[in-house]
Image (spheres, rainbow, N blue to C red):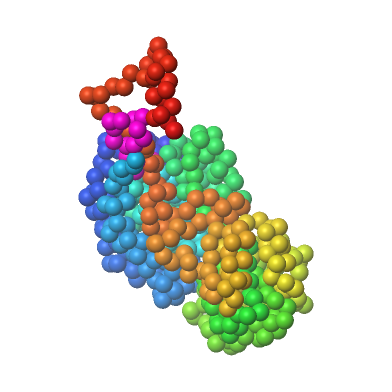
Amino acid sequence: MNESEIRKIVEKQRTYFYTGATLPLDGRIRALKKLKNYIREHETALNDAIREDLGKSAYESYMCETGLVLTEISYMIRHIRSFAREKAVHTPLAQFHSRSFVKPSPYGVTLIMSPWNYPFLLTIDPLADAIAAGNTAVIKPSAYSPNTSRAIQEMIRECFDEEYVTVITGGRAENTCLLNEHFDYIFFTGSQAVGKEVMAHAARRLTPVTLELGGKSPCIVEKSGDIPLAAKRIVFGKYLNCGQTCVAPDYIYCDRRIKDQLVEEIRKQIRKQFGSDPLTNGTYGKIINEKHFDRITGLIDPGKVVCGGRSDRATLKIEPTVMDNVTFDDAVMQEEIFGPVLPVLTYETLDAAIRKINSMQHPLALYLFTSSKPAVKKVMSRCGFGGGCVNDTIIHLATSEMGFGGFGESGMGSYHGKEGFRTFSHYKSIVDKKTWLDLPMRYQPYKKFNEKLLHIFLR
């Protein structure tokens, strides 16, 4: 799609938005229900598309993509009326007699740019929030997951008119054309590098943005932690979707005294969860493309591999891999791994680990395994990160009751549930002033008596 065609779509959506068609709550609910029904009726086809792109089983696709989307849509349908309600606030004495309130209002024409690693979830989740808040949306899915992108495009065409929601496919050229257009809000999920480009384009028009990025999310295992349980849950979180999860534990940072036991338990869990030959496991995913396959395999140091390490370029599969005796200077620690490679590093004291983590870029997630309440309090209060878990991994993003997002290098803004509605809404602060009373003290000429009253009112 060329620049002219994209501009026409954006203009058409803006014209449609200004008719007020997206404002009635009943209409928003109907739109969400239509989307929900389509997903339910076409679940198999959607899961098949995801499998073509990433090798995910239908079980994993439902657990981590279509099922989570249905949960978010259902949550929005149940709560949209309360979220959209005006909220009265206290009116100061100086504004007597008035009514003060905050009114949620949609931004207008929004742009949702989604990644390839969870191509359905990370496209439709923010779309549900945008629709619930009363916006129109232009969706740009990733070119790296073409099968899911086509399935999404077909779904949107079936459910919505183009002036309400539309999908634009393509690659870098289409991305550039979209970012050159005037949107009222941009929601981007992806890498830091592209996130910087999105923010730079948005700055030209002072367009507000949400950036959902990533980073090297640490997994701290403290000496008092339940080591077998920690290993089980770390293996699940790290190797889910073949490690291509923005909140996957990027590396283990553990007390040196329990490191050998932890590594052995992780080995056992890899065999238990993925079998003796993960490369032939039909429910274990694959790397999205050859470019990322080569990047990830290039991070593996054969001399430090203690589990896994094999790969098959023909199938784009890499075994769940563990590297021991890793330092912060190794290549695998210089970038977000975003693949099934788990480095293990050790610390002498928890305080030293906290200092090291805080010296690095703010991660999107942090995980802590411990049975010590003081350790929980210390890490959760002193480390900077987007969100996380104590004694588990990644599950914090699977709820509509909490916002999900990062800060600093891992992003800005959040969504899911009420936070998603807030993200796609502008909250207007309004004073409704009555006409039957007009206090004279604010008008010229100012008088000494009025000055005394003013001091009373504004204390």
Q: Look at 22% across and 50% down and name the residue there.
A: 26
Q: Look at 60% across and 51% down and name the residue there.
A: 408
Q: Quadrant of residue 298?
A: bottom right
Judged from this view, the residue extending furthest toward the top is 445
| Left or right: 284 in relation to 298 | left
Q: Nearer the viewer, residue 438 or 295?
A: 438
Q: Quadrant of residue 425?
A: top left
Query: Where is residue 91 shown, x and y percent of the image?
Result: 34, 36
| Left or right: 417 in relation to 305 | left
| Left or right: 94 in relation to 112 | left
Q: Look at 50% across and 34% down and name the residue there.
A: 205
47 falls in the magenta region: no
Query: Where is residue 362 shown, x and y percent of the image?
Result: 62, 56
Rendered view: 225 above or below 85: below
Count of picture labels: 0
Q: Quadrant of residue 377?
A: bottom right
Work out whether residue 343 can be spotted: no
Figure quadrant of the N terminus: top left
Figure quadrant of the C terminus: top left
Rendered view: 300 above or below 125: below
Q: Nearer the viewer, residue 40 or 214?
A: 214
Q: Look at 76% across and 69% down and name the residue there.
A: 327
Q: Nearer the viewer, residue 116 or 431?
A: 431
Work out whether residue 418 can be spotted: yes
Magenta region, residue range = 91-107
Query: Where is residue 109 shown, x and y percent of the image?
Result: 38, 41
Query: Where is residue 285 shown, x and y percent of the image?
Result: 52, 73
